[in-house]
Structures are given as structure tokens and as C-alpha cells.
Amino acid sequence: MAEVAAASIPPAWEIGKCIWVPIATRINYARKLTNNWEALCKKASELCSKKDVIVVEIERFRLQRTPIQECVNWINEVAEMENKVATLEQEFNVEKKCVWGLCPNIFERIKLGKLVVNMITKIDLLIEKKFENGFLVDSLPARVERRPEPPSTLSSSAHHTLDVVLNKLRDESTQKIGILGMGGVGKTTVLDLLNKSHEAETYFDFVIWVTISNSWSIRKLQNEVGNQLKIKIDANESNDTVASKLLQRLEGKKYLLLLDDVWDEVDLRVVGFPNANQQNGWKVVLTTRKMEVCRKMGTDAEVPVSVLPNEEAWEMFSSEVGHVATL
């Protein structure tokens, strides 16, 4: 019985080892504090350099690309770690003494040494972080192309026309709408109201506004659309190449294309727009002075804008030139 009891008692050296290992570890925290601190500073500098390279790359492509959320979180963690190292440096530089300041406070050095070792481990993990598919993705275009605020004295006629246009937009069978009327009757005002409408911001992924006018060209139109979609277009690229870029970005998106002041047919397919249909859900609204343009563009509905009453016409004129004329 005594032999069984003796066998169940671990040898003294094993007991001593269990006691000594944690003690030795704590002593090493204090004994190697200076060397570990130097290693920490070196790794912190390496981490900072890696972060700086990534931040410079993000800023370089700021207009075309955006960092993934994983990268943003990593940058924030690095910044937090830099603050912790700075705080720890203040503690390291303070000589904490005991016995009336004649010798180092061993317990404080153990505590500080453990913090340094743990921080080295965390910094190593941040340094080793890899973004397998890169840390930048193409920026999403703005949902709505922002334009100057319309005058506060908008005519009731413009709001009425807007309601008509919105009703036609809600019709799934209507892909293209023409706002038709002579110059100065408020077609662009209606388009501006549509651009800022609740339906435009909620129903579509984004809204593209392009002013065509008499001097338009395929490349000019492509450049304007590319700018809104945050697509980089090189001057030496062919129109077909740019059209492919636009088509790739727009494919599968539900968007509203606003074409202001159209004077002649614009072949949207050549520019890089996919064909509008009920399946893809994107739609076109254009303003023009000519019914012939609506026919060439294949509009499904036309909304006429009549000449404004005298009072409303004067309000619109005043909002454009200011109250500088006297009656």
C-alpha cells in the first residue's frame, strides 16, 4: 500500500520544474526587457513602413478605386498599435525604482517585459497580414449625379410634368422616355427634379446625367460617363475599347440614364450602354426640341412640355439672371 502511494507522488525534480518554469519566464521578462524593446521598435517600424506603402497606393488611385473593408480595418488596427507602442515607450523610458530609488523595481520590469513580448506577437500578425485578392477594388459610382440645386420658385408646371414622367418610369414596358418642348420651357428643370427624386435614389443603383448639345461626340460622351462611373479612360484607347469598359461596368446594374439637350440620334450601343429592356431594368430619359429625335432614339413615350404661363416664365427668368430688370 505504501509502495502504491509512493509511486503516485511525482518526483521532487518534476515538482521543482513546474514551479521554476513560470518563475524563469517572469524573470526573463525583466532580464531581456531591453533586448525585447529594441526588437519591438524594429518590428513597429517595419509595420509602419508596410502601412505607409498601402496608404500611398490607396491615395494614388483614390478617384478610381477604393480599399476593401478588410484593408480599412487593418489600417485602423495598425494605427491603434502605433498608439500603444508610443504609450509603452513612455513607460519604458521612466526609471521605476524601489528601495528608495537605489535599484530597479523588478515587479514593474516583469510587467512591462510581458507587455513588450505580447505586443511583438500582435505586431508580427499585422505584418504577416496578406490581402489575397488585393486591397483595392473599383469604386462604385455615386448613386445620383449631384448638380446645383434648382431654384426654390420652381413652377407647378414642372412638378406636374415630373409626375407624368415618374408614372411612365414605373411602367415596366417603358424603357425610353422623351421630354419634348421648345427651348426655354423648362425641360432641363424637369430632368433636374427627376435626378433628385426619391424614385431615382431608391429604385436605381445609380443615375447618370449627360448633357449632349450640338457639339457632342462618341468619345466626349464616353469620357463624361466614364468620369461619373470612376473608370480610367486613356486618350489612346479606341472608342470600341472604351465601350467595352463601360459595358462591363454597367452590365447587370439597374440605372437611369438622363440625356439632356439631345439634337440628333445618339447610338447608345456604340457608346457602351447595353440595350434597355425589362430584364435589366435600366431606363433612359432624354430632353429634346424635336419629335424626330424621339423617333430616332426609339422612345416608348413622349411627355410634352408646354410654354409656361407669364408669371411662371418670369419666375424662371428671374431665378436665372437675378432680379435686375425693372418693369
Image (cartoon, rainbow, N blue to C red):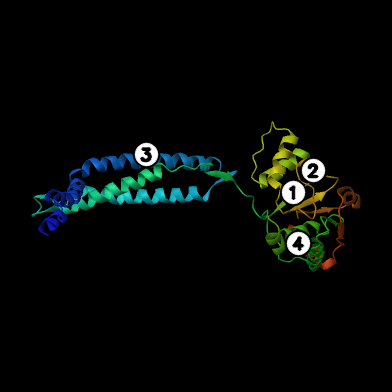
Q: Quadrant of the image for the N terminus?
A: bottom left
Mark 4 and mark 2 lie on one chain; the one further toward the N terminus is 2
> Can you tell which quarter of the image residue 313 is in?
bottom right
Q: Are marks 4 and 2 in contact (CB under 8 Å)?
A: no
The residue under label 1 is 210
Mark 2 and mark 3 lie on one chain; the one further toward the N terminus is 3
Q: Tell me the number on the disc at residue 46.
A: 3
**Circle count:** 4
* 210 vs 255, nearest the viewer: 255
Q: Is residue 159 left or right of residue 54?
A: right
Amino acid type, residue under disc 4 in the picture: Ser
Mark 1 and mark 3 lie on one chain; the one further toward the N terminus is 3
> Can you tell which quarter of the image residue 170 is in?
bottom right
Does residue 326 appear in the picture of this structure? no
Mark 4 and mark 3 lie on one chain; the one further toward the N terminus is 3
How far apart are labels 4 and 2 at the CA level? 40 Å
Residue 314 in the image: state x and y as whole percent: 80, 64
Mark 3 residue crowding within 10 angstroms, few (<14) / some (14–19) / many (20+): some
Q: Tell me the number on the disc at residue 118.
A: none
Q: Are marks 1 and 3 in contact (CB under 8 Å)?
A: no
The residue under label 2 is 269
Amino acid type, residue under disc 1 in the picture: Val
Q: Residue furthest front?
A: 1
Mark 1 residue crowding within 10 angstroms, few (<14) / some (14–19) / many (20+): some
The residue under label 4 is 318
> Can you tell which quarter of the image residue 220 is in?
top right
Mark 1 and mark 4 lie on one chain; the one further toward the N terminus is 1
Residue 98 in the image: state x and y as whole percent: 11, 54
Q: Is residue 223 left or right of residue 179?
A: left
Q: Is residue 6 left or right of residue 169?
A: left
Which residue is found at the position 25% from the left and 50% from the top?
114
